[in-house]
Image: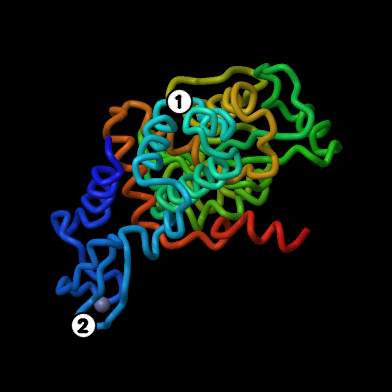
């Protein structure tokens, strides 16, 4: 793929809603002056000058268009995720460039994951990540381990709410905080599945609750939190296999894994397009724009 073709692919994806024809991101006007040599447009209505990445998460990108597309394709294929180091090697770019690009993609996917509420049958479950990592066992989910984990201070809890056969929304918070959050995320009239953890007792007043006692069994017919746990095991595999230390950026990693879990049966081609489109329809990242420049100034 040439750089020109890469740029054309960006134009198609960004302006898909207008059949690939560019329009002004400020006023939606499609009467534009084209500044071909600089791959820019100027709006005839409001004079705004923009490129295909203006006001998106890819604004002020350092990579070429085709490299960004290649990066998304590589990242799409890594079911457990992909480390920035690996991506940097594959793209022949600096690790920090790959690191920032991946975090921008995660931010876009995170917005996508969290833009809708959950309803119907929803499973809720918490698990701890980061800090001291014990060999993987089912016992990680048990309560006595949680108390130990709480003492180390570095381990943090991700409480996930997962609509059965629907969307997965992870939150970096304790199960108690997760239970407080639940009514703002889960629609009334929903049925909630949870384990025996006391944190969820307060939800009985608001929802129809079905509880599974994990000290006795993992499922009783329909009653289980298996889908929530399947998110946690994907997180766990990613933590061990790819990222090793995810505690610093736990929320973005959790969002990535939630998205991968929800799209596990979607074809690679479709996943690729969704990620590229999510990036091109997401506003400039406050956190990651100029990240390394800021760190240099701070040092
Ligand atoms: Zn305009």
Q: Residues within 10 Å of mark 2 (few under 14, many from 20)?
A: some
Closest to the camera, between mark 1 and mark 2, is 2
Q: Is mark 2 within 8 Å of ligand 1?
A: yes
- SS for callout 2: loop
Residue under the point 13% across and 55% down: 19
- Quick check: marks 1 and 2 in contact, CB under 8 Å? no
- Write the residue at 57% across / 42% down: 99
Label number found at residue 221: none
- Where in the image, quadrant-wise, is ligand 1 located? bottom left
Residue situated in front as seen by the camera: 150 or 196: 150
Residue 282, how many percent across, how many down? Answer: 40, 57
In-front residue for pair 99/255: 99
Residue 40: percent from the left, percent from the top? 28, 65
Q: Residue at x 37, y 35 (%)?
A: 70
For this rendering, which residue is in front, 214 or 131? 131
Q: Nearer the viewer, residue 211 or 139?
A: 139
Q: Is residue 56 above or below residue 27?
A: above
Give x and y (percent) for residue 122: 45, 40
Q: Is residue 249 left or right of residue 273?
A: right
Q: Which residue is mark 1?
A: 79
1 or 2: tag closer to the N-terminus: 2
Quadrant housing the N terminus: top left
Residue under label 2: 45
Q: Residue at x 54, y 63 (%)?
A: 286
Residue farthest toward the front in the current orientation of the protein? 37
SS for callout 1: loop
Above or below — where is 117 with respect to 2? below
């Amino acid at each position: 793929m040439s750089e020109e073709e890469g740029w054309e692919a960006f134009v198609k994806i960004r302006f898909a809603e207008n059949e690939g024809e560019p329009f002004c991101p400020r006023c939606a006007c499609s009467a534009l002056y084209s500044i071909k040599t600089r791959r820019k447009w100027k709006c005839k209505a409001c004079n705004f000058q923009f490129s295909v990445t203006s006001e998106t998460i890819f604004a002020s990108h350092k990579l070429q268009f085709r490299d960004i597309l290649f990066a998304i394709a590589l990242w799409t294929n890594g079911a457990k995720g992909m480390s920035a180091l690996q991506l940097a090697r594959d793209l022949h770019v600096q690790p920090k460039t790959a690191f920032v690009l991946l975090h921008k993609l995660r931010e876009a996917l995170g917005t996508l994951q969290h833009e809708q509420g959950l309803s119907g049958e929803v499973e809720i479950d918490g698990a701890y990540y980061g800090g001291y990592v014990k060999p993987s066992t089912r016992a990680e989910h048990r309560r006595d381990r949680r108390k130990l984990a709480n003492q180390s201070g570095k381990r943090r809890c991700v409480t996930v709410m997962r609509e059965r056969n629907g969307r997965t929304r992870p939150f970096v918070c304790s199960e108690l905080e997760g239970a407080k959050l639940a009514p703002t995320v889960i629609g009334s009239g929903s049925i909630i599945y949870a384990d025996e953890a006391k944190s969820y007792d307060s939800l009985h007043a608001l929802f129809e609750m079905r509880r599974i006692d994990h000290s006795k069994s993992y499922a009783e017919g329909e009653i289980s939190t298996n889908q929530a746990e399947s998110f946690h095991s994907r997180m766990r595999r990613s933590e061990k296999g790819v990222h090793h230390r995810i505690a610093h950026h736990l929320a973005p990693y959790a969002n990535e894994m939630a998205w991968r879990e929800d799209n596990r049966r979607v074809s690679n081609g479709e996943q690729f397009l969704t990620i590229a489109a999510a990036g091109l329809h997401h506003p400039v990242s406050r956190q990651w724009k100029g990240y390394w420049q800021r760190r240099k100034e701070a040092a």
